Image (cartoon, grey):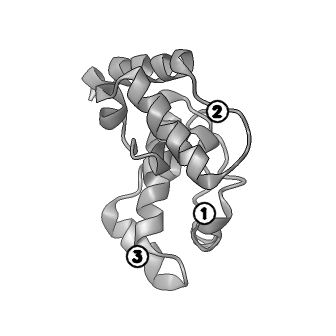
Amino acid sequence: MSRESPLQELPQSFRDEQRELVAAGIDTWGALQQLSDHQLSQLSRRGRASARNFKRLRGMAELVCCLDLAPADAALLMHAGLATVAALSAASPQDVVTRTGRLERQLRSGRPPVVDLAVAQRWIKAAQAWQPRN
């Protein structure tokens, strides 16, 4: 996904936050990534949306924009404890597979694992390549 990809089909747990983002005219992953803590706080004061969920969404936006990941993959990494580019770049492929696999087993999705060693290695290399540019 690119920075200009629209914010659509966010997980159901972010429906209030998505409503506030749309109302504020924030409709792309890049625009979400650029929001400051203060702006997120202001958005969370308007309705039922929470600052915590806005920060999670901004973390997902960082993974989507910087590493060109799909939002579902960014959400999987975030919920598996690898919520930043730095955390992913420091992880081993086996650690990524273990963490994401554990999360999927806890969720009892019943589907085959999405992340294998090759995918984990590709994500880690992308994170490491992006890291020095900061």
Residue 25, by quadrant, is bottom right
At label 3, counting other C-alpha atoms closer than 10 Å, the crowd grade (few under 14, some 14-19, many 20 or more) is: few
Nearest to N terminus: mark 2 or mark 1: 1
Q: Mark 1 points at which residue?
A: 25
Residue 26 in the image: state x and y as whole percent.
57, 59
Q: Which residue is drawn at 47% across and 66% down?
A: 53
Q: Is mark 3 on a helix, strand or loop?
A: helix
Nearest to N terminus: mark 3 or mark 2: 3
Q: Label 2 amino acid?
A: Pro
Q: Which callout, 3 or 2, points to the residue nearer the camera? A: 2
Q: Mark 3 points at which residue?
A: 42
Which is nearer the eye, 31 or 50? 50
Q: Label 1 amino acid?
A: Gly
Q: Name the residue under label 2.
A: 113
At label 2, counting other C-alpha atoms closer than 10 Å, the crowd grade (few under 14, some 14-19, many 20 or more) is: few
Q: Label 3 amino acid?
A: Gln
Q: Which callout, 1 or 3, points to the residue nearer the camera? A: 3
Residue 33 in the image: state x and y as whole percent.
45, 48
Quick check: 25 above or below 94? below
Q: Which callout, 2 or 1, points to the residue nearer the camera? A: 2
